[in-house]
Image (cartoon, helix red, strand yellow):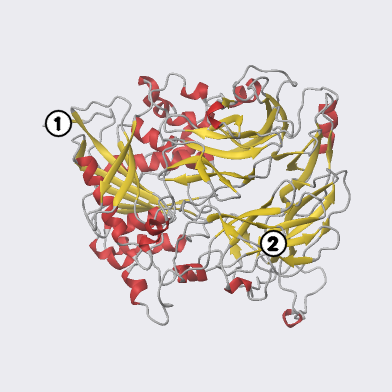
Amino acid sequence: MGARAAAAVYARGEARPMFRKAPRPPHQEVPMDTRAPLSRRALFRNPVPLIALCALGVLFSLAIPGSALVAQGANGALALESWLDWERVQDPRISPDGGAVVYERLWVDRMNDAWESSIWIVNADGSRPRHLVDGSSPRWSPDGSRLAFLAPDDEGTTQIFVRWMDAEGAVSQVTRLTDSPSNLAWSPDGTRFSFTMRVGAEQPTARHWSIPLPKPEGATWTPEPRIIERLVYRQDRVGFLGDKYRHIFVVPAEGGTARQLTLGDFDYGVPVWEPDGQSLLFSGLIAEDAVYRWQETEIYRLDAASGELSQVTTRKGPDNRPVPSPDGRMIAYVGHDTTTFDYIESAVYVMNADGSNPRALTAEMDRSPGALHWAPDGGGVYFDAAADGYRNLHYASVDGEVRAMTEGPQMFGLNDVSGGGMAVGMWGDAHEPGDIHAFPVDRPDRRTRLTDVNADVLAGVTLGEVEQVWSESSHDGLPIHGWVIKPPDFDESRQYPLILVIHGGPHGMYNGGFNFSWQEHAANGYVVLYTNPRGSSGYGTEFGNAIQYDYPNHDFDDLMSSVDEVISRGYVDDGNMFVYGCSGGGVLTSWVVGHTDRFRAASANCPVVNWFNFPNEVDGNYLRWYADFREFPWVDPSEHIRRSPISYVGNVTTPTMLMTGVRDLRTPMSQTEQFYQALKAQNKPTAMVQFEGEWHGTSRLPSNFLRTQLILRKWFERWGTHDDERTAATMP
């Protein structure tokens, strides 16, 4: 059934809502914080032959009965199979009157190996949570009478739909586009939508590529070759870009022809309406040499009627994410001056609407802000920021006063603020997965919990205790922050195997929030250590830039010092330790095994091992990666060779597994293959696991998340002394 037909059925009250793949009962009120509709979940409760999910051949011997996956939960520990019942909530939006919140609710479709999404609504006091419609990206109309969202049409192409929020709940399809729209936004008067979409030719159409072929009529010939002339020609999770660029469109809210406002071979940023509804703001760089000036972006104003462009900012450096004040007289945005640093924390800026009097409000804070939200009175902006492993809310007045609105070991994000000052955001901590909360934006301590979608999964589960760990780097004494998760049945008189997990980026940040993967490791008897070595974000510009022209190197010392700190506490079996990481964590894992033999086994997932050729095969702008080195490799390759983990592959004695997605364009599979082949050529213990259906990473698809966890467990058990009963060694 197509979207329009399903909408008509749903409006008549029949028991078949839009887009759902499994049957669901009619609209009904449900108690607060219940899980997804019972009929849908019941369909997926049927036993699944996990042999099909896990069998990878003799090497890993994963053809095990499903009961083996749930046995670990018998003593109250987190069971891996419960991932199939796991849910996520995201993108909450509060109604203009502050009385209701809509959000995306995602669950695992076991039969189709996918995450499915629906839109739910709940009152701001937490009452009456209920399903609205299947789709994503819900957006309230300015008067709250309608809800726009994205969903597939009859042919499976994503389109814009509108649902009326009255009792009938009629749904109409607004667009009939040939490609998928994104960044949907209402105009202030509720008559139009703006959105972005990639448009252009699949192939370059320049005349010099037009060639005559003597193809007989009706013949079947090989498709035309792919012709590439762009510097940036492919993108992870998208594929090859052809001659397509992201442009800005508007379309009437009642339906009609979408009108393209922007032109040229440029990628335009996310548009934001100005209060008068006459123009939009966006960030980007509209210049012929833009691709070579990858460190720069400016803020532009786009006339919504004529498409005329005017540049608002002019400084060198990135200016991003413009948000106009409620009265339209000022613009808040995020950016920093151009520097020679590889990493720098951004600041909140404000300027007059014409671009005059730009000034930084949070320069002294030295922490990058999240999304900006103007206070209803226009006196300043609220935002969240990651700092020292956690996320909290802040306020910056236009006069330059900055204050923390929340503090402490939590993950508190700000998603939306109504005109009356009610806000909605995500809150979680080490033992509670992120869920949606509503609160007055100026009193976040008065938050009301709106969702608890994994309460049934975690009911009766004993999670591992999470503790912060601080250590001093053996290189220079730099303080290094991290956490350990202990097994749920932790006994301080015993010693446990340890898993060191390394984050990617390299300018990423592990945080003190809940992590299913690591809690599942702990449920199997491991102490799990995860840290933020030098180069991590969230600890200031100096800390983040400490690896410039020197990655990897002393971040290895930071990691080993954190391991030593945990060993010194007496509960780790230092002869039974393991290490893994993905992306930048794969870089450091492959570096670790080339510089120490203290780990029993390792897994370098989606790594970069060869800096000489990696920038030439990465997606996106490869010039960004060359900026991490003082010279291009064809000028002086010595630094690229010194910093490439494959240069030390001859030192490796640790059994090292490599895992990657077969579609990875970020750290392409060839990087993984180089390290595997180099190890195999020396007859060293190794294995390579290539995940079908995965781009960058190995766990996007639900079955591949299970496989990743099981394969890691099997590899570590193969080379360690960790037995199946999860027993730890008794301390001497």
The quarter of the displayed image where residue 685 is located: bottom left
**Amino acid identity at mark 1:** Met
Determine whether 613 is above or below 608 in the image.
below
Q: Which circle's residue, 2 or 1, is located before the other in the chain? A: 2
Quarter of the N terminus within the rendering = top right
- The residue carrying pointer 1 sits among few (fewer than 14), some (14 to 19) or many (20 or more) residues within 10 Å by Cα, namely few
Residue 201 in view = no
Residue drawn at x 61%, y 29% is 438
Considering the numbered disc 1 on the image, is that residue within a helix, a strand or a loop? Answer: loop
Residue drawn at x 58%, y 25% is 448
Instruction: Judge from the rendering whether residue 196 lies leftward or rightward of residue 75; answer left or right.
Output: right
Residue furthest to the front: 399
**Amino acid identity at mark 2:** Tyr
Residue drawn at x 47%, y 51% is 367
Residue 100 in view = yes
The one of 264 and 438 positioned closer to us in this rendering: 438
Q: Which residue is mark 2?
A: 268
Mark nearest the camera among 2 and 1 is 2
x and y percent of residue 386 in the render?
47, 45
Q: Which residue is mark 1?
A: 731
Considering the numbered disc 2 on the image, is that residue within a helix, a strand or a loop? Answer: loop
